[in-house]
Image (spheres, rainbow, N blue to C red):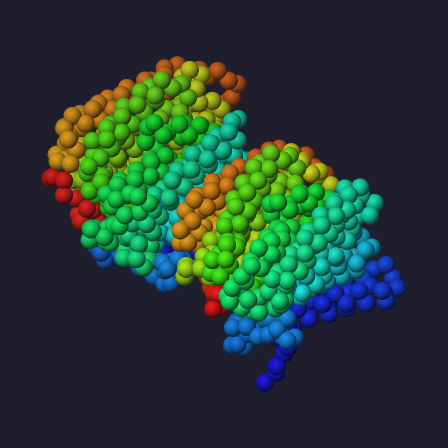
């Protein structure tokens, strides 16, 4: 009987980061890009495999296991999200292998991506507000550097600065919120905070309420939700495309992982609502504002990457339903939050894939606007088919993965009695078809004339994996949604 | 598992065709499409089902297993055939093969993508007609949109982008409406009295009656009415029923001929098939209450489509509008709720699929050589293309309902059925109005043929017009043979159709 530490998937990500940095500093020649990519991909795959193994094998981990005096917990949800982060890391590092603008600096890029992924994995496991904050910073600091990675590029450095300033501000708000909650409850451990809420906060309710509101602000920043979404379009557009893919998929999911655990475990809905801290209502407002703003802004863009950035805000709005549709009385809490997790999982493939296609287009030098993509379908059919599948999946068109996750998510909202929220989401989702199909039209219906270089193998491989992930989720969606709902239900136990 | 094998094969065939070089894609696609065709003919030969799939009949080739759970409902993979779906499945496979062969001449760019999409569409259509679980059905239903969107948008005529978007938006909004209607009826109305959304379970729960609950302030009857209307409008766009038909002429005129064949031949039938399954089988009482409205819409479509066809100069537009007219008959037959009416309507779906496919294909062959479809631009084609023109004339007579051709059987049954209907108030009046449509059809078809096909040859364009190549004419001949075969011996399909619709009817002889 081999026993592995429950946090093995997280450790593997961190160790891979160190291995990449070590190899990068030891190597003498200019080559070695292949080795760096190899280490990163294999390490991330190992993490993905372990997380998947822990999830499916009968390890007892899905029920939850505390580590480090309860500061960290490994359970179904943390493993689910770690698998997601590792999968996105595989796609991003593989895709970045052929991304020319980062030539010669791959070691740094991979190392930072893997470190950020480690931080995200810890965010999903954080069972104490102190751990949550440290993990948040571990995920954020590499992200700032990643956005500003192209030092010679004004857009990239400007985006990095903007990202950093808003990040610093929201981190301050987040940590201030933590201090207020600590002041009101006397603990940083989520179960203890929950116990304090259950036994009544008395006259400290107001302090706790402000703290909860501020923590929600920190979450909104990390998930690129209203009102802390301003950085997202700039950062995603200025950053190298693989980094945009990583931030918009994995980083957003990490923010939600943190929010799911902190709010559900730390601020139990029944006690919080009866004390007047109705955070589900807050998230209902945020969900509507975020999806409407993201979708309407996306519809008016003329650059593909910026459109994807705003659509990413819109998707954050959909996922917020997973928090908004919770209630103390309902028996469907696990289902709707599981559906939100499943949507993030599917999103990890389709959105990463879409940004990787943008990376491919940047490599080809075809430009950033919709018109610049004209006729790519005739010239590069495989990549264009993959992009088409990603876009239709993002729009939620059957039979692709995005349809199923949206269906479960919206059905969850209906089950929870939030008809109006589901209706708003469906209207937004229909609108999104309009701007996604603009790219499809450019790819297939318009004539274009490009002088394209060949098909980079690793980037194509990454596209193929993302495509398989998007399409195979048609028959394979059952296990994903069941795992997610089981993991989410465990949180409410 | 035979059905799954065929669907799976069609998907694989689509992928293979997508990957082979352009030069051979047409041949490879046609060869691969023969397998589903033979398979569906085998299904037809071995068919052993009886009764209606939705009212507890015995399904042929049934497969059922659980997939996942959605909000307490079990989503299943559930396929099977009854006497209504089997003819449509055969029609799909048959027309796909012929349409692929007919594309060899006109499609001269990106062939592998074109034929791949045709096969992808076939796979989804087969799935749509065989699926008996709502979610699987809906996924296939929506997925047929995508290939048609690309077929029109990439290989279409000058206004292809506009036509593709219009097609997509119209049918997608309609699907959404239908989806909301059905979900409100089942989630909201039936609630916990069913544990799957399989169509037979829903139909039988509704038939048992009395267990539709109130929902969102709507009483049971109001909820059923709203759901019926939402689904009816959703499907009516697809049929299309005037006045929801405006996407159709654009889509047809811009679509490449093989796509038009599939659009008119099979995709329009999706609408009437779904109406029969959902509106008329699940909510017959509401359909009976609204019979006068539905019959009026049917008769209106017949006359309005025919008059619009009369005013057209473009041959393809003429055939497109006459489709609106023909599908009006189907609607009239369905709402009659008589044995002849419903069976005739189902039979007319097949007959019209074959005849309109034939007409579009023949117009396409003429366009291949003349590069014009305008009635005023040409005359005397019979001289130069005798075989094509001969088949076109035969097809046109089929459209007019010449006895011993498939169209006659369908329309005759519909008229008999709707005339005797006790569900439609003043049924003879509606029948008479609709029958008048035949006269207009004969008028515009004869007029157009007289101007283009007969008289001395002339053409307002500088093209050499000669005989069409064999592989253009062969599919036409095969289609004509099929039309005649079904006209001479409607029992090939009619027996199983009668058997399957028997539990639904009760509105008079």
Residue B307 visible in image: yes
Q: Which of B335 and B314 is in front in this view?
A: B335
Q: Residue furthest left?
A: B509
Q: In this view, does A218 lie to the left or right of A365?
A: left
What is the tally of numbered marks visible in this picture? Answer: 0
Q: Which of A131 and A184 is in front in this view?
A: A184
Q: In this view, does B212 lie to the left or right of B314?
A: left
Decide: is B236 above or below A68.
Answer: above
Residue A353 image position (x, y, % from top left): 62, 51
Decide: is B459 above or below A199.
Answer: above
Residue B3 image position (x, y, % from top left): 36, 56
Quarter in which the N terminus of chain B is drawn: bottom left
Q: In this view, does A241 lie to the left or right of B428?
A: right
Q: Nearer the viewer, residue B254 or B108?
A: B254
Q: Which residue lies furthest to the bottom in this view?
A: A1
Tell me what residue is drawn at x 43 percent, y 34 percent: B170
Tell me what residue is drawn at x 21 percent, y 43 percent: B284
Residue A455 visible in image: no
Quarter in which the C terminus of chain B is drawn: top left
Decide: is A361 above or below A42.
Answer: above
Residue B500 image position (x, y, % from top left): 21, 49
Q: Which of A240 and B14 is in front in this view?
A: A240
Residue B157 image position (x, y, % from top left): 51, 28
Q: In this view, does B288 lie to the left or right of B80?
A: left
Tell me what residue is drawn at x 54 percent, y 61 percent: A202
Q: Which residue lies furthest to the front in this view?
A: A203
Tell me what residue is drawn at x 86 percent, y 67 percent: A26
């Amino acid at each position: 009987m081999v026993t592995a530490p429950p946090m093995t998937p997280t450790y593997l990500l961190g160790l891979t980061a160190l291995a990449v940095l070590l190899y990068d500093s030891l190597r003498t020649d200019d080559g070695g890009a292949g080795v760096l990519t190899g280490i990163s991909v294999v390490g991330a795959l190992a993490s993905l495999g372990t997380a998947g193994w822990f999830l499916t094998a009968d390890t007892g981990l899905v029920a939850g296991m505390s580590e480090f005096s309860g500061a960290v917990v490994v359970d179904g949800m943390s493993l689910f999200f770690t698998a997601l982060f590792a999968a996105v890391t595989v796609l991003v590092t593989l895709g970045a292998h052929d991304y020319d603008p980062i030539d010669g600096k791959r070691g740094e890029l991979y190392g930072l991506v893997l470190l950020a992924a480690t931080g995200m994995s810890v965010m999903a496991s954080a069972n104490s507000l102190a751990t949550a904050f440290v993990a948040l910073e571990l995920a954020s600091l590499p992200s700032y550097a990643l956005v500003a990675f192209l030092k010679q590029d004004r857009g990239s450095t400007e985006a990095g600065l903007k990202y950093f300033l808003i990040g610093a501000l929201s981190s301050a708000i987040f940590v201030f919120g933590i201090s207020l909650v600590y002041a009101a409850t006397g603990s940083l451990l989520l179960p203890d905070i929950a116990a304090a809420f259950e036994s009544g906060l008395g006259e400290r309710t107001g302090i706790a309420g402000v703290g909860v509101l501020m923590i929600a602000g920190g979450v909104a920043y990390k998930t690129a939700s209203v009102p802390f979404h301003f950085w997202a379009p700039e950062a995603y557009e200025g950053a190298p495309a693989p980094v945009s893919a990583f931030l918009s998929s994995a980083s957003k999911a990490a923010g939600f992982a943190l929010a799911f655990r902190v709010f559900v475990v730390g601020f139990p809905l029944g006690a919080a609502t009866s004390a007047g801290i109705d955070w589900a209502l807050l998230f209902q407002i945020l969900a509507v504002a975020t999806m409407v703003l993201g979708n309407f802004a996306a519809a008016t863009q003329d650059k593909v990457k910026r459109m994807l950035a705003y659509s990413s805000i819109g998707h954050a709005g959909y996922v917020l339903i997973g928090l908004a549709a919770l209630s103390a009385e309902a028996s469907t809490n696990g289902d709707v939050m599981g559906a939100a997790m499943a949507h993030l999982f599917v999103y990890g493939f389709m959105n990463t894939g879409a940004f990787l296609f943008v990376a491919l287009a940047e490599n080809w030098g075809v430009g950033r606007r919709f018109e610049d993509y004209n006729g790519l379908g005739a010239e590069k059919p495989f990549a264009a088919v993959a992009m088409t599948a990603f876009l239709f999946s993002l729009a939620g068109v059957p039979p692709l993965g995005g349809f199923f996750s949206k269906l479960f998510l919206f059905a969850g909202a209906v089950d929870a009695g939030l008809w109006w929220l589901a209706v708003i989401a469906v209207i937004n989702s229909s609108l999104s078809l309009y701007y996604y199909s603009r790219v499809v039209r450019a790819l297939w219906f318009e004539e274009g004339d490009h002088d394209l270089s060949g098909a980079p193998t690793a980037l194509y491989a990454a596209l193929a994996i993302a495509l398989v992930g998007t399409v195979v989720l048609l028959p394979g969606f059952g296990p994903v949604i069941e795992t997610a709902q089981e993991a989410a239900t465990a949180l409410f136990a | 598992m035979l059905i799954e094998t065929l669907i799976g094969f069609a998907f694989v065939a689509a992928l293979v065709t997508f990957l082979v070089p352009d030069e051979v894609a047409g041949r490879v696609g046609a060869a691969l499409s023969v397998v589903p065709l033979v398979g569906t003919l085998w299904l037809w030969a071995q068919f052993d089902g009886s009764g209606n799939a939705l009212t507890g009949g015995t399904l042929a080739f049934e497969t059922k297993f659980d997939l996942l759970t959605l909000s307490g409902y079990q989503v299943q993979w559930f396929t099977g055939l009854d006497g209504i779906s089997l003819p449509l499945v055969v029609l799909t496979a048959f027309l796909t093969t012929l349409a692929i062969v007919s594309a060899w001449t006109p499609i001269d760019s990106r062939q592998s993508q074109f034929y791949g999409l045709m096969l992808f569409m076939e796979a989804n259509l087969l799935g749509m007609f065989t699926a008996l679980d709502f979610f699987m059905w809906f996924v296939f239903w929506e997925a047929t949109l995508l290939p048609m969107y690309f077929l029109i948008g990439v290989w279409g005529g000058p206004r292809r982008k506009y036509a593709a978007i219009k097609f997509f938006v119209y049918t997608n909004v309609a699907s959404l409406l239908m989806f909301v209607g059905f979900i409100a009826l089942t989630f909201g109305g039936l609630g916990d009295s069913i544990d799957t959304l399989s169509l037979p379970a829903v139909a039988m729960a509704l038939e048992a009656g009395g267990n539709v609950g109130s929902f969102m302030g709507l009483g049971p009857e109001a909820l059923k009415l709203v759901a019926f209307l939402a689904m009816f409008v959703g499907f009516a766009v697809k049929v299309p029923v005037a006045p929801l038909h405006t996407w159709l002429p654009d889509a047809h005129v811009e679509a490449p001929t093989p796509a038009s064949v599939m659009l008119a031949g099979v995709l329009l039938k999706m609408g009437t098939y779904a109406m029969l399954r959902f509106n008329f089988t699940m909510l017959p009482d509401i359909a009976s209450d609204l019979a006068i409205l539905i019959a009026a819409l049917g008769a209106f479509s017949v006359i309005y489509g025919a008059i619009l066809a009369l005013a057209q100069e473009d041959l393809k537009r003429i055939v497109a509008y006459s489709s609106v007219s023909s599908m009006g008959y189907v609607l009239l037959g369905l709402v009659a709720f008589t044995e002849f009416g419903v069976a005739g309507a189902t039979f007319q779906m097949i007959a019209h699929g074959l005849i309109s496919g034939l007409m579009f294909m023949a117009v396409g062959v003429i366009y291949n050589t003349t590069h014009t479809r305008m009635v005023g631009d040409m005359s005397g084609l019979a001289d130069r293309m005798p075989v094509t023109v001969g088949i076109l004339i035969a097809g046109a007579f089929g459209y007019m309902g010449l006895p011993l051709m498939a169209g006659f059987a369908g329309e005759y049954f519909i008229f008999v059925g709707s005339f005797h209907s006790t569900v439609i108030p003043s049924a003879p009046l509606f029948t008479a109005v609709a029958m008048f449509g035949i006269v207009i059809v004969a008028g515009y078809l004869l007029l157009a043929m007289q101007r283009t096909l007969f008289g001395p040859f002339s053409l307002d364009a500088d093209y050499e017009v000669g005989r069409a190549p064999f592989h253009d004419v062969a599919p036409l001949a095969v289609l004509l043979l099929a039309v005649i075969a079904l006209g001479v011996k409607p029992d090939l399909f009619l027996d199983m159709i009668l058997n399957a619709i028997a539990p639904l009817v009760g509105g008079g002889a």
